[in-house]
Image: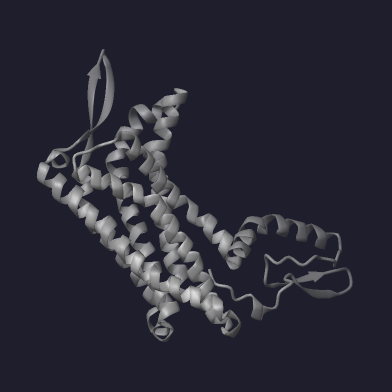
Amino acid sequence: MRSSINCCLMGLTTFDMIVTTTSILMFGLTEIGEYTKTITWYTEGVFQRVTPFVFPLALIAQTGSVYLTVTVTVERYIAVCRPLRARSLCTYGRAKIYVISVAFFSIIYNIPRFWEVSYQECYMNGEKSSFVVASELRLNQYYIEIYIMWMYLIVMYLVPFLSLIVFNFFIYQKVRAANLERQHMSRLQQKEISLAVMLLVVVTVFFVCNVLAFIINILELLNITIGLLTMASNLLVTINSSVNFIIYCIFSKRFRKLFLKMLCSGVLSRVMRRNVARGSTAFRNNSAYGDSRKLSSSRTTQIFRLSSRHGSQSSDSV
């Protein structure tokens, strides 16, 4: 699994997990508390205190997720459309640099967000209450127009959307041409094409889940605000950060095998130890593993290959 594409996907997954977690903290738990009248310890105290930190963290993770999606697209474009340059540009070491660079850019770009909101405490009807309030910076008209509206529109939507459209157009053309001559392609070329198809699905989901946020940003430039659209946009952004895992499982056989290995290794290990203790040497093959085990019976020691596939056939990526 040590490849450039997997390094980028690992970075993308990290940002997606942060987006999902911050969405739960800012939206999920508060809605649960409102409708069930429970977890008041969080909704009436903790939420107000953590929001000034969770809010900018969510935007940092969202920025990183967007630009790592672009990075993965560029990486697939080079691997599929410029294979001669892939050896030098698509390496594991360079991929780590790309991920770190995106993370650094995301933090720098969103530093002003840490001064946008704060919380205040006051007494109402003799009871102490906490509220999340906008700071003076967040209410500044120039800050709203330049940073929140125009820069957000350009940096978070126009640049990544146009980049994704251009690069995925060339990838789609290459994939379409490759499907017509698949029987003449090497195994490595077929693997690169299958990864490109998976990425096209990831990017399609990205467009579907983020286009509403793009529309809302345009409406805000026209001084039009619709609360229900904003809530729907937040939900779609969270779904986009949650659904990539399912796409990986559907399109990557290697990903499924490793996932099953992590999920089932504990259960299978206990079964094997139990069978060894009973002196049994009969074990079924399990394709979730690709290694060997030495199993001792009362008389001899035998080596069982716990895989029904040959090593040369298990080089799927991702």
Q: Is residue 13 among the parts visible in the rendering? A: no
281 left or right, relative to 70: right
Residue 200, given in percent of the width and then of the height, sits at: 46, 64
In-front residue for pair 94/217: 217
> Which quadrant of the figure has residue 80?
bottom left
- Total labels: the figure holds 0
In-front residue for pair 156/281: 156
Q: In the rendered view, would you say 251 is above or below 184?
A: above
**Which residue is rendered at x = 47% and y = 50% of the image?**
242
Q: Is residue 28 among the parts visible in the rendering? A: yes
279 left or right, relative to 22: right
> Which quadrant of the figure has residue 302?
bottom right
**Which residue is rendered at x = 43% and y = 52% of the image?**
241
Residue 236, given in percent of the width and then of the height, sits at: 41, 46
Residue extending furthest right? 299
Residue 167, given in percent of the width and then of the height, sits at: 36, 70
63 left or right, relative to 194: left
> Which quadrant of the figure has residue 250?
bottom right
Residue 267, given in percent of the width and then of the height, sits at: 70, 54
233 left or right, relative to 273: left
Q: In the rendered view, would you say 87 is above or below 292?
A: below
